[in-house]
Image: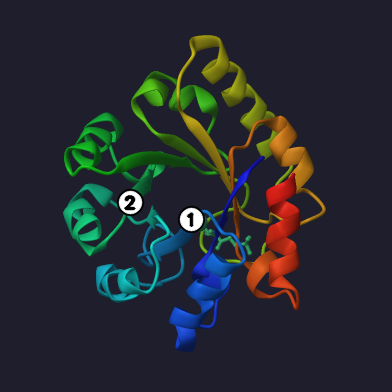
Amino acid sequence: MAKIAPSILSADFSNLEQEIKKVEDFGADFIHIDVMDGNFVPNITLGPCVIESIRKVTNLPFDVHLMVENPERYLKDFAEAGADIISFHQEATHHVHRTIQDIKKLGIKAGVAINPATPVSLIEDILEEVDLILVMSVNPGFGGQSFIKSALKKISTLKQIILKNNYKTLIEVDGGINEDNAEKIVKAGADILVAGSAIYKSCDPKGVIKKLKLI
Ligand code: DX5
Ligand code: ZN
């Protein structure tokens, strides 16, 4: 059974407390928080202040997805604001291994995200070190895009390497996930599904989370 991480990027930002409590009641496992800097990706979202203020509305773990250049500059700020997991992009720093170590030193979990064009081979050497790999199945920057099918092969390649080596690394998949394609994604090897618009833009978010969790 997959774990579900609703992305609040598609939530109503004027009522974040309600939007977070709602998905918690419906059985979400994490809250996925998309941080964009207008530099690594062509969009700007939120920073540590917002995370700090929503930290008090839920006990669900905060899964913070940093889409920012040089993420190493902000790790402490996000950890202090309440992140339980920080994932940064392989493409956004020269020092992937060091950044993983720095996140772990802060006492939280570390993830590395890879864009659709980034091959698994580029993160193979750090797989054992990270708690999760975040496979992007859209180009990061916006919610509501379509799932890029080549992500499926990438997920299964990753899963094979993880199983073969007995690593504990989880696979999280992010972008364009909905009730129609979730089964294929989980079959390929995903452990955590991120879903933004499929949950928040639905007239039955409870039903969507229930369905996704049963896969
Ligand atoms: C995209 C973000 C995603 C986004 C997913 O850059 O990382 O987390 O919110 O949204 P959907 O599920 O609508 O593709
Ligand atoms: Zn994300």
Q: Position of residue 194 (x, y in %)?
A: 58, 54
Q: Residues within 10 Å of mark 2 (few under 14, many from 20)?
A: some
Question: Is 142 situated above or below 213?
Answer: below
- How many numbered circles does the render carry? 2
Residue type at the position of mark 2: Asp
Residue wearing tag 2: 84
Whole-percent x, y for residue 121 in the image: 50, 22
Disc 1 under 8 Å from ligand 2? The reply is: no
Q: Out of 212 and 154, give the one closest to the viewer.
A: 212
Q: Which mark is residue 30?
A: 1
Question: For numbered disc 2, what is the local secondary structure?
Answer: loop
SS at circle 1 = loop
Residue ranking furthest to the top: 164
Give the residue displayed 40% in from the left and 42% down from the top: 91
Quadrant occupied by the C terminus: top right
Whether residue 190 can be seen here: yes
- The residue sitting at 56% across, 16% down in the picture is 163
Give left or right: position of 49 versus 166. Answer: left
In the image, what residue occupies the spot 78% across and 39% down? Answer: 184
Q: Is mark 2 within 8 Å of ligand 2?
A: no
